[in-house]
Image: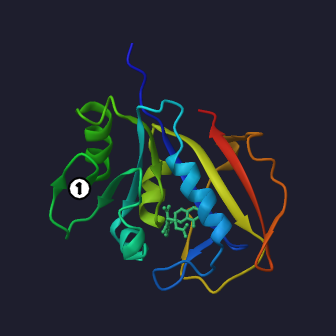
Amino acid sequence: IPKTIPMNMIVAVDASNGIAKDNSLPWHLPQEYKHFQSGTIKTNDPAKKNVVLMGRKCWESIPTKFRPLKNRINVVLSRAMPREISDDFLVLNDFDEAIRILTTTEPFASRVETIWNVGGKEVYALGLAHPLMKDLVITRIQKGFDTDVAFPEVDWENFERNDDFDGKEIEEKGLVYTINSYTRKT
Ligand code: FOL
C-alpha cells in the first residue's frame, strides 16, 4: 500500500506572530538558519530527498548564493515565472497541482520523503488548510519586531505538541527563542 507523502511546515515567528518585513526576515540568527537547513534536509531514507515548497516572494528573499536550497528539491509557486519541471527544481502556478505532481508523478513520488512548506504567509495558509499537512515546527522568538506579514492563525486545538524539540530557551545574538514541533490530530 503506497504511503502518502506528508507535508510539514517550518516557520520562525516573533512575539506577535510576525514572519517578515519588506520581504525579508527581520532578524539574523545563524544557528536558527542551521536548524531550518538541517531540519529540511534530513531524511530517514538516505535514498530520498525532501522538497522545500515556497512562494515566489520567499524564493526571492533567499540570498542568490543559497538558492536553490542545496540537497533539497526546490518547488516555487509563481504565476509570473515560467513553468519548469526538472528533477530538482520546479516552478508551478498552483499549490494543489504541486502537491499532485510531487505525490503522484515520477520521478518525484518515489523519491520524495517529506514536503516542507517553508512559506511565506499565503503558502502557509494553503498548507494549514490541506489534508496532507502533518507537522508544524515553529520557532518562537521572544521579542517583537517591526513586521508587515504574520503567520496565519492556527487552531491549536487541532495540534498536539511533540517532545522532539524540548522547547528549551535558546539564546543567540541577544535574542531568546524556543523551538517546538506539533502534529495535527485530525
Ligand atoms: N523557518 C525557520 N525556523 N527559520 C527560518 O529562518 C525560516 N525561513 C524561511 C522559512 N522557514 C523558516 C524562509 N526564508 C534561507 C533564507 C531564507 C529563508 C529560508 C532559507 C537560506 O538561505 N537557507 C540556507 C542556509 C543559510 C544559512 O545557513 O545561513 C539553507 O541551506 O537552508
The residue type indicated by label 1 comes to Leu
Q: Does the residue labelled 1 lie within 8 Å of ligand 1?
A: no
Q: 94 or 90: which is nearer to us? A: 90
Q: In which quarter of the image is residue 80?
A: bottom left
Residue 111 % position (x, y): 34, 33
Q: Residue furthest right?
A: 168
Does 72 appear above or below 139? above
- Of the pair 114 and 55, the residue shown nearer to us: 114
User: Between residues 138 and 125, which one lies in front from this camera angle?
Assistant: 138
Name the spot of residue 138 as percent of width and height, x first. Answer: 65, 56
Q: Is residue 3 positioned above or below 152 on the image?
A: above
Q: Indicate the secondary structure of the residue bearing disc 1.
A: strand
Q: Image point 29% across, 49% down: which residue?
A: 88
Residue at 54% over, 43% down: 42
Count of numbered circles in the view:
1
Please report the residue visible at 73 percent of the width from the left and 39 percent of the height from the top. 162
- Residue shown at the point (31%, 32%) measured from the top left: 109
Image side of residue 56 versus residue 169, left or right: left
Q: In this view, does 86 lie above or below 16?
A: above
In x, y percent, where is residue 2? 38, 18
Please identify the quadrant where the N terminus is shown.
Answer: top left
Question: Residue 93 vs residue 158: left or right?
Answer: left
Rendering quarter of residue 161:
top right
Q: How crowded is mark 1: few (under 14 residues within 10 Å), some or many (20 or more)?
A: many
**Coloring scheme of the render?**
rainbow
Rendered location of residue 186, percent (x, y): 59, 32
* Residue 130 location, quadrant: top left
Q: Name the residue under label 1.
A: 92
Please give left or right for residue 151 compared with residue 86 in the image: right
Q: In this view, does 174 lie above or below 54?
A: below
